[in-house]
Amino acid sequence: MYELTVHAEFCAAHAITIAGTLEPTHGHNWRVTLTLWGTTLDADGLLCDFHAVEAALAAVTAPFQNADLNTTPPFDRVNPTAEHVARHIAEATQRALANVLPAGTRVASCRVTEAPGCAATYFSPPPPTL
């Protein structure tokens, strides 16, 4: 098994609803750690080119840069918790890399840190077994 990790950052504000109450809007310097797993390397000995993963992650997070997540899709419809942000980034990056990743390689997890010591991690479900 091989693992590849890429980091990114963006600044964004949000206000989440907790127990029916909307908290005040506030900002974070969000730090993203995206991890891919795979069982095989390509002909060049790569799980995936770092630059391809960085570009896909940058494209996924670009709409959030200096934005209010509560007004930015999909968080204009989904409570913009760190957990939801992590899942969205993982799933959107997986879709963005669909034509780039070798067979057997997938986004395994996405960790989003809102503030020092405060992080949420989404783990992609394992692929179905045949």
Image: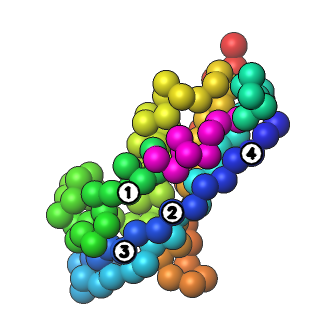
Name the residue furthest right.
Answer: 1
- 72 vs 99: above or below: below
Mark closest to the chain's N terminus, 1 or 3: 3
Q: What's the residue at 71%, 35% (across, down)? A: 47
Between marks 3 and 2, how big is the CA–CA gap? 11 Å
| Disc 2 target residue | 8
| Disc 4 target residue | 3
The stretch in magenta equals 47-55
Q: What's the residue at 41%, 59% (across, down)? A: 85
In the rendered image, which quarter contains the C terminus?
A: top right
Mark 1 neighbour density, 10 Å: few (under 14) some (14–19) many (20 or more): many
Mark closest to the chain's N terminus, 4 or 2: 4
Dot 3: element: strand
Dot 2: element: strand
Q: Position of residue 127 (x, y in %)?
A: 63, 28
Mark 3 neighbour density, 10 Å: few (under 14) some (14–19) many (20 or more): some
Q: Amino acid at mark 2?
A: Ala
Between marks 4 and 2, how big is the CA–CA gap? 17 Å
| Disc 3 target residue | 11
Q: Quadrant of residue 125?
A: top right
Mark closest to the chain's N terminus, 4 or 3: 4
Residue 128 seen in render: yes
Mark 4 neighbour density, 10 Å: few (under 14) some (14–19) many (20 or more): some
- 122 vs 1: above or below: below
Q: Amino acid at mark 1?
A: Thr
Q: Is residue 51 within the magenta segment?
A: yes
- The residue closer to the viewer here, 1 or 44, is 44
Q: Main secondary structure of the magenta part?
A: helix
- 54 vs 10: above or below: above
- The residue closer to the viewer here, 68 or 16, is 68
